[in-house]
Amino acid sequence: MTSASATPTLLTQRLQSIDALRGLVILFMLLDHVRETFFLHRQVSDPMAIDATDPSLFASRTLAHLCAPVFVLLTGLSAWLYGEKYQGRSDVSAFLFKRGLFLVLLEFTLVNFAWTFQLPPSVVYMQVIWAIGVSMIALSLLVWLPRPALLALGALIIAGHNLLDGLHFGVESALHVPWAILHDRGWLEVSDSLRLRTSYPVLPWIGVITLGYGLGPWFARGSDAGERQHRLLLAGVIALLGFMVLRLYNGYGEAPWSGYPTVIQTLMSFFNITKYPPSLLFLALTLGCGLLLLRAFERAGRARWISALAVFGAAPMFFYLLHLYVLKLLYLACVALLGLNHGDYFGFDGIGAVWLGALLLATALYLPVRWFARLKARRRDIRWLKYF
């Protein structure tokens, strides 16, 4: 929601740091989606199976854990900045509601088709775009609360939702569908030919977006950069210390870790956390890292690599749709030309090729994303562009 980094002289460091952090997690997402496309024969579980997961694959997947929490947090923060720009909670509430509906529709249409290439679909995966959309709709109602109440509610949801892990409702219950959407990941049978998968239960994500909106005043125009960076440091360190203490305690909302014959496997077990839905520990670790990265990016100033990352972060939805379709077409081309080399899949032989593929794809997509970011910044009269 911030201006494109194609016009860096008009973009303050506080806003460019937001775009740059969004750009970084977009690149981590690209890495993970290359893995899901060309390394699917080595699929990982959630949390991962330590005995069956190579450390390099574990590290690649763990990096991608940053993506959704940081992106949702920044969505809430950007919503506050949008409200500051247009001088009213009614404007931001209306924008959040409309954009949330747009994202939900996008998940069920263009995004799902990009994953399956199936019309009509037999399965619809309600993933991260769905979760962000529903969270934005929820935030469109919550923005009317006082800021202390917003911060308290966001923290309460993040810290307390794991208390609900043992609550389940069978398909015969009227609460089965709403609870599957909110917290209990599962399948929803719509008809004999259509199933929905609630891959991203939305309750914890509503907590994250609410917290992000509550942090907005730290980034207000004219706010003191030193004070903001101090608050980001303090909040990030507290989140990471909370993760360490709770993980050592080994008792709340997460699969326990244990010692292994090697130090690397023991560390893998310690950082092996649950994403679906995201546990308190998952969010404490990823949001803590995200806040510290946001501080570091702001302090980095006008470094060229910050500006390059900000290009990806200035047009996130355009990049998201573009990279999904490019990946799908690349995969189909490889199957047509080279055949299936790993059972039912075509895939790379090693994780190094996944990283190389992600690097080459990021390089190839940079120019079209920069073009679209500049178009957004230049053509503010085209209202639909702001949704991308």
Image: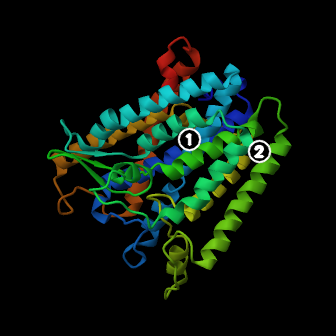
Dot 2 falls on a residue whose secondary structure is helix
Q: Residues within 10 Å of mark 1 (few under 14, many from 20)?
A: many
Separation of marks 2 and 1 at Cα, in angstroms: 17 Å
The reply to whether residue 32 is in sight is yes
**At 49% from the left edge and 88% from the top edge, which residue is drawn?**
261
Q: Residue 125, position in %: x, y?
A: 32, 47
Q: Amino acid at mark 1?
A: Gly
Residue name at image x 58 percent, y 20 percent:
377
> What coloring was used for the rendering?
rainbow
Tell me the residue at 35%/40% (across/down): 324
Q: Is residue 83 left or right of residue 193?
A: right
Which x, y percent locates residue 207? 58, 49
Q: Is residue 27 above or below residue 49?
A: above
Front-lying residue, 338 or 294: 294
Query: Could you say where residue 329 lies in the image, as x and y percent from the top left?
Result: 27, 39
Residue position marked by numbered label 2 in the rendering? 299
Q: Is residue 267 left or right of residue 330?
A: right
**Residue type, numbered disc 2:** Arg
* In the image, residue 378 above or below residue 294: above
Q: Is residue 372 left or right of residue 332?
A: right
> In this rendering, would 272 be left or right of 115?
right
Instruction: Please report the residue visible at 49 percent of the width from the left and 62 percent of the height from the top.
Output: 164
Q: Quadrant of residue 248?
A: bottom right
Most distant residue in the bottom direction: 261
In the picture of the structure, the residue carrying the numbered disc 1 is: 23
Looking at the image, can residue 24 be seen? no
* Numbered label attached to residue 83: none
